[in-house]
Image (cartoon, helix red, strand yellow):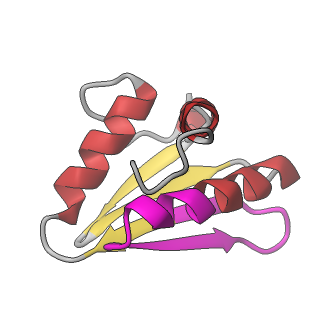
Amino acid sequence: MTAIPAEQRPVHLAKSRELFSQIQETRELSNGYEFRFADELSVVKKLADFVSLEKLCCPFLRFQIQVEEESGPVWLRLTGREGVKAFIREEISGLTGLTGFPMINKSEL
């Protein structure tokens, strides 16, 4: 995380925790994970802000933000080379405070 300017790290970490607390569904992919968020304008901006800083410290990750048509959900896909899944799982678990993140669909709860 040292690639992110020191003065931005605490705010980035707090915003990342808040953002990833809004995950509605997680899907495991062969080379990473994708996370579904509600269709809200603020989510798209928060995801873009997250990616703009995370790419500095994690150049080995591929980031994709997908906005579905007709008020559909917003997806963040994190993928990369072999071994990146474990890294993603550990990082997101650290942000959410869970030891592992369940593959859940919160809209079904």
Rendered view: 26 above or below 14: below
Residue 98: percent from left, percent from top:
33, 24
What residue is shown at x 33% (from left), y 34% (from top)? 93
The residue furthest top is 97
Instruction: Give the left or right position of residue 77, taking residue 75 as reference.
Output: left
Q: Which residues are magenta?
A: 51-76
> Looking at this view, is 14 or 93 the one in front?
14
Image location of residue 82, percent across then percent down: 14, 73
Quarter of the figure that contains the C terminus:
top right
Q: Is residue 3 left or right of residue 82?
A: right
Is 87 covered by the magenta stretch?
no
Where, by quadrant of the figure, is residue 17 drawn? top right
Residue pictured at 86% horizontal, 54% vertical: 41
In this view, 81 is above or below 99: below
The reply to whether residue 95 is in sight is yes
Q: Residue at x 72, y 71 (%)?
A: 68
Q: Residue at (39%, 49%) from the top-left corner?
A: 2
87 versus 8 height, above or below = below
In the image shown, does 71 or 101 lie closer to the viewer? 101
Visible in this render: residue 102? Answer: no
